[in-house]
Image (cartoon, grey):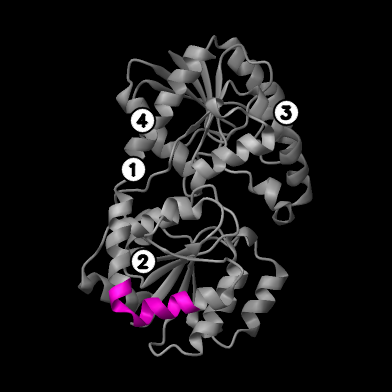
Amino acid sequence: MRIAVNTRLLVPGKMDGIARFTFESLKLICEKHSEHHFDFIFDRKPPSGFNFPSNVSFHKLSPPARHPILWWIWFELRLKKFVNKGSYDLFLSPEGWIPPELNCPSLGVIHDLNFVHHPENIIASHRKYLRHYFPKFAQRASRIATVSAFSKADICRTYRIKTDRIDVVYNGALESFKPITEEEKSQLKASYSNGYPYFIFIGTLHPRKNLEHLFKAFELFKKTDKHNTKLLVVGNRKWWPTELEELYQEMLAKNSVVFCGRQSDEQLSKMLAAADGLTYLPYFEGFGIPILEAFQSGTPVITSNVSSMPEIAQDAAILCKPKSEQQIAHAMQKLMENKKLKQELIEKGLKRAQDFSWSRTADLLWESMLKTQKNG
């Protein structure tokens, strides 16, 4: 087969959830299925740092699509023309965006519908485009893949898609996320929290990641904290609203909050493995890769009891209402004071992590691609 792939989001140093899914799954698929040729299509100069096998070709298609008007030009006109001229057997879009009237079957990976359920967290121009075009993308796709049973049900319900048109392709986590020694933990704590225990948040600092209630919960927890516990916040301040800055500045415990910025995968894996707990409490998530990374690292997890997170965590995490700072603070306190509970969660997390891997992701996505090409 000749397969065209939208790889617009593969930007070194900026690969969060969707881009990580794209990179890790495609790397394995291209290696495992060398008899097929893959054309990766970028909206800017293809990066030089990626080491894909020889059955992959890189293509640049202008203009850079980073604004709704340019999105429309790139997807509705330029990408459509490129794919239709290429006589492809399949078009794959790991971010779910599908051009109109393609001459080949298409598979769109729709990770979640956060822009439908929480439009208040997206700027107006982007919100308008996504809410107008994603129903079209879903209908245009010959087949759809998504990353959790929750998201599958949500897409079916919201866009009236038949369940047999959607495949669940779970995410994985890098093998570098694994437990570390007590000596390594001490070194990490010396570097980031002056030797004190810490909770860690990982993710883009976006409103739906719910730092507001995490900060309030941490403030409440600190009133009874006996260990001088810190909170490490790892991620770019891509969205940092005035209200959140004001909340942070008013915190009595703000000196115990450590902003670490974005970290390399290697460093992040060590920071997570040294943490006393992951505090990851979004309002809405299609999967929640940090949960899985924490499980692999032997780090207990506090996460939300909404959307996909109970499905991914099952009984291996403490589940809280994401807007209840009392529940979150109580969960933090339990992790710090109840060693038996902490060890139980670590063991359950390590076991649950065995259900996921990027190799499994790649196999599931390839199966979905074959179904799409066969039935397209």
The x and y percentages for residue 341 are: 32, 73
Mark carried by residue 363:
4
**Contact? badges 3 and 1 (CB < 8 Å):** no
Q: Earlier in the sequence, mark 2 or mark 4?
A: 2
Looking at numbered disc 2 in the image, what kind of residue is underneath it?
Pro
Quadrant of the rendering where the N terminus is positioned: top left
- Is 376 on the left-hand or right-hand side of 241? left
Looking at numbered disc 1 in the image, what kind of residue is underneath it?
Ser
Q: Earlier in the sequence, mark 3 or mark 4?
A: 3
Looking at numbered disc 3 in the image, what kind of residue is underneath it?
Ile
- Callout 1 secondary element: loop
Residue picked out by circle 2: 300
Check residue 296 for magenta coloring. no
Residue picked out by circle 1: 357
Q: Earlier in the sequence, mark 4 or mark 1?
A: 1
The x and y percentages for residue 301 are: 40, 65
**Contact? badges 2 and 1 (CB < 8 Å):** no
| Neighbour tally class for label 1: few under 14, some 14-19, many 20 plus, Cα within 10 Å | some
Q: Is residue 111 visible?
A: no
Tell me the distance, in whole angstroms, between the alpha carbons under discs 3 and 1. Answer: 36 Å
Residues in magenta? 330-341
Residue picked out by circle 3: 73
Residue, x 73% and y 45% (percent of image)? 126
Q: How many marks?
A: 4
